[in-house]
Amino acid sequence: MPEGGQHAADESSAHRERLRADCGRCFGLCCVAPAFAASADFAIDKAAGQPCPHLRADFGCSIHDHLRPQGFPGCTVYDCFGAGQQVAQVTFGGQDWRRTPGIAAQMFEAFAIMRQLHELLWYLGEALTLPPARPLYGQLSRARDETERLTRASPDTLGDLDLQAHRLDINALLLRASELARAQHRRPETNLRGADLIGKDLRSADLRGASLRGAYLTGADLSGADLRTADLTGADLRGADLSGADLAASLFLTQSQLEAATGDLTTKLPPALAPPAHWPPRRPSPGRAGPRD
Ligand code: SF4
């Protein structure tokens, strides 16, 4: 790899590392700040700002190894993109909401904002690795620098931020990056942005270059589908079957989306993502002898 290319790859990898959750440096913010509604994802109702009853005094989770069987799969798919440790250690300088209850409300508000900023940083970082988006690298870099600057802001400045406007500007840029990256395979019939594809049979579908931004793919069968250069920003993949699907060059896929889906070791993933621990190693082949046979 040329020296410049190696530098860009190292920078991209360091950038991604910073956006990984480090729960040991957080104060359980995702277990306190948001409200939960009892559902298939969470076994309990919980008001915003109220600690989950499973949150320990040391901010660990008392059922961490049993979240799915205990009815908390939503916790296993949640990703703060490193916003928790940023708010805990940088924005509030290591103060925690238990020992300093006066900061709690502002800290929880800052966490919700920071998570969105960090999520934008994740997408911007990925866009900056897409060779077809090279004409946009200057704008993408400036957007990333500005977003980085905001992540270091004080709690008051974060509270005053027009986050919606910032998101809109960056989303427009990411859309253009996506269009450039999908240009080679783009077809009108695969413009499925926001489409209702719940439970659809998409086995072995050719979805190269598709826009699946915000698509509802809950429970869809995408086994064996070709999703190279498909834009999956915000697609709902809960319970979708990705066994044997090719997502290696998909765009804007997150670990959280993978955690919510099922797949196996034949699913091809982007290098920055890992197969979730709950995926079975390999899909049982049809007609294979079961335990009773
Ligand atoms: S169950 Fe565990 S991970 Fe989920 S919110 Fe409660 S303490 Fe946090």
Image: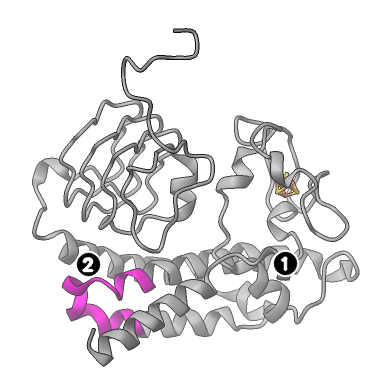
Secondary element at tag 2: helix
Colouring mode (rainbow / by chain / secondary structure / one colour): one colour
Q: Nearer the viewer, residue 233 or 160?
A: 233
Q: Earlier in the sequence, mark 2 or mark 1?
A: 1
Position of residue 281 measured from the top left corner of the image (x, y, whole percent): 44, 38
Specify the quadrant that holds the N terminus: bottom left
Name which residue lies at 26% across and 81% down. 137
Name which residue lies at 69% across and 46% down. 35
Specify the quadrant that holds the C terminus: top left
Position of residue 158 measured from the top left corner of the image (x, y, whole percent): 61, 75
Magenta highlight range: 125-141
Please identify the residue farthest to the top as the structure is shown: 293
Cα–Cα gap, marks 2 and 1? 37 Å
Q: Which mark is residue 24?
A: 1
Do residues under tags 2 and 1 come within 8 Å of each other at their CB atoms? no
Give the answer, above or below, for where 43 lies relative to 119.
above
Q: Which mark is residue 51?
A: none
Q: Which mark is residue 176?
A: 2
Position of residue 231 measured from the top left corner of the image (x, y, whole percent): 27, 54
Give the answer, above or below, for where 53 lies relative to 252.
above
